[in-house]
């Protein structure tokens, strides 16, 4: 895969670019799914193909990017890292699950999904909509922080930590069929392996993928996608195929991100976009379809994606201007982390 080159500084700029690429795929994916369920996106073949390609790697990408700084964050904060993640991940998960769910209940005559008040009460054990990612990510952080806490005492050689985290993730993946059929256990078994992959990348790589590796990665990504989704020569249901497909996609995005700064601003707002994009994207679909009587697919895709990406950024700036930061992080009185 080419020479791995270190870069200076703990904050890697390309991570924001990769988040920006990922969040655009998230928004587009949810906009397209909304249009499909609303009957506007009627070509099921193209919808299924694009949807499967995007979902084969874009959420594993975010777990990978989250895992990159896990060990260095633990070295700075120790078990206080858990409190930090309650503030930055679990708090917005709870708050925005309630906000979006309430909006969907109020707008149930116009939306594709009919949300019951009972489903909002179940978000502590059954996340809903796109917020499953934050729910899973928090508990993946909790798991890995606990393991690191024990490793600090039992295995002080830090070089072994990423490998042990990966070994645990592999065991969880293999043992998934034996686990309780609860969302928490199943989702951790599915995604902890990408988080652990991120910790190994941080330890072994410290930076960049050689430009010579990018083209082979991109070609391998195309070949794998073609073999899985076009020809069926490779069966996606096999767990190893799922992981391999996602990992190649992750590395391809990283290679692209390290040679561009175009999406870095979107990466900086990726959390806020993730929290709000369904509300704004769905709102745009309702406005364009019901208000403007537009049924053409392309205007819906463009306007819905732009609304889902840009309006959360404007909303975030407005939130800061009116000092309603409690919508994004806990008020100081109940904040657990520093």
Image (cartoon, rainbow, N blue to C red):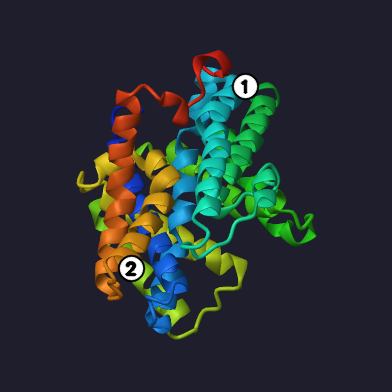
* 268 sits to left or right of 338: left
Give x and y (percent) for residue 337.
54, 19
Residue closest to the eye, 97 or 23: 97
**Residue lying at 40% horizontally and 25% vertically, measured from the top left:** 324
**Residue lying at 50% horizontally and 40% vertically, measured from the top left:** 67
2 and 1 marks in contact (CB < 8 Å): no
Give x and y (percent) for residue 159.
54, 32
Q: Look at the numbered disc 1 and give the secondary structure of its residue.
A: loop
Residue 79: assigned label = 1
**Residue lying at 65% horizontally and 49% vertically, measured from the top left:** 117
**Residue 88 visible at all:** yes
* 189 sits to left or right of 236: right
Q: Which residue is mark 2?
A: 289
**Residue 3 visible at all:** no
Residue closest to the eye, 35 or 193: 35
Label 1 neighbour load within 10 Å: few <14, some 14-19, many 20+:
some
Label count reads 2
Residue 7: assigned label = none
Q: From the viewer's perspective, is residue 200 above or below residue 233?
A: above
Question: Spatial distance from mark 2 to mark 1, Cα to Cα?
Answer: 49 Å
Query: Mark 2 or mark 1: which comes first in sequence?
Result: 1
Q: Looking at the rendering, in which quadrant would you find the N terminus?
A: bottom left
* 173 sits to left or right of 21: right
Residue closest to the eye, 261 or 256: 261
Q: Quadrant of residue 249?
A: bottom left
Residue closest to the eye, 305 or 168: 305
């Amino acid at each position: 895969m080419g020479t791995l080159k270190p870069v200076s500084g703990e904050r890697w700029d390309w991570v924001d670019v990769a988040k920006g690429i990922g969040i655009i795929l998230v928004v587009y994916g949810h906009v397209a799914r909304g249009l499909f369920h609303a009957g506007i996106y009627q070509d099921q073949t193209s919808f299924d193909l694009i949807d499967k390609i995007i979902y084969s790697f874009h959420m594993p990408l975010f777990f990978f990017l989250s895992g990159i700084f896990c060990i260095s964050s633990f070295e700075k904060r120790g078990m206080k890292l858990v409190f930090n993640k309650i503030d930055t991940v679990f708090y917005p998960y709870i708050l925005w699950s309630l906000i979006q769910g309430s909006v969907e209940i109020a707008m149930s005559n116009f939306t594709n999904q009919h949300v019951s008040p009972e489903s909002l009460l179940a978000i502590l054990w059954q996340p809903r909509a796109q917020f499953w990612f934050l729910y899973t990510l928090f508990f993946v952080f909790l798991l890995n922080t606990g393991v690191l806490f024990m490793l600090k005492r039992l295995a002080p050689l830090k070089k072994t930590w990423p490998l042990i985290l990966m070994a645990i993730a592999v065991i969880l993946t293999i043992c998934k069929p034996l686990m309780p059929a609860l969302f928490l256990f199943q989702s951790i078994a599915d995604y902890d392996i990408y988080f652990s992959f991120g910790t190994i990348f941080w330890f072994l790589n410290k930076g960049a993928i050689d430009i010579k590796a990018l083209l082979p990665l991109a070609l391998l990504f195309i070949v794998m996608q073609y073999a899985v989704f076009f020809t069926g020569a490779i069966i996606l249901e096999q767990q190893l195929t799922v992981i391999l497909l996602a990992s190649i996609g992750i590395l391809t995005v990283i290679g692209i991100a390290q040679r561009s700064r175009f999406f870095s601003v979107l990466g900086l707002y990726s959390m806020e976009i993730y929290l709000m994009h369904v509300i704004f994207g769905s709102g745009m679909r309702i406005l364009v379809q019901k208000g403007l009587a537009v049924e053409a697919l392309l205007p819906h895709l463009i306007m819905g994606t732009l609304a889902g990406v840009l309006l959360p950024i404007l909303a975030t700036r407005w939130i800061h201007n009116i000092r309603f930061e409690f919508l994004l992080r806990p008020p100081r009185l109940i904040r657990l982390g520093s």
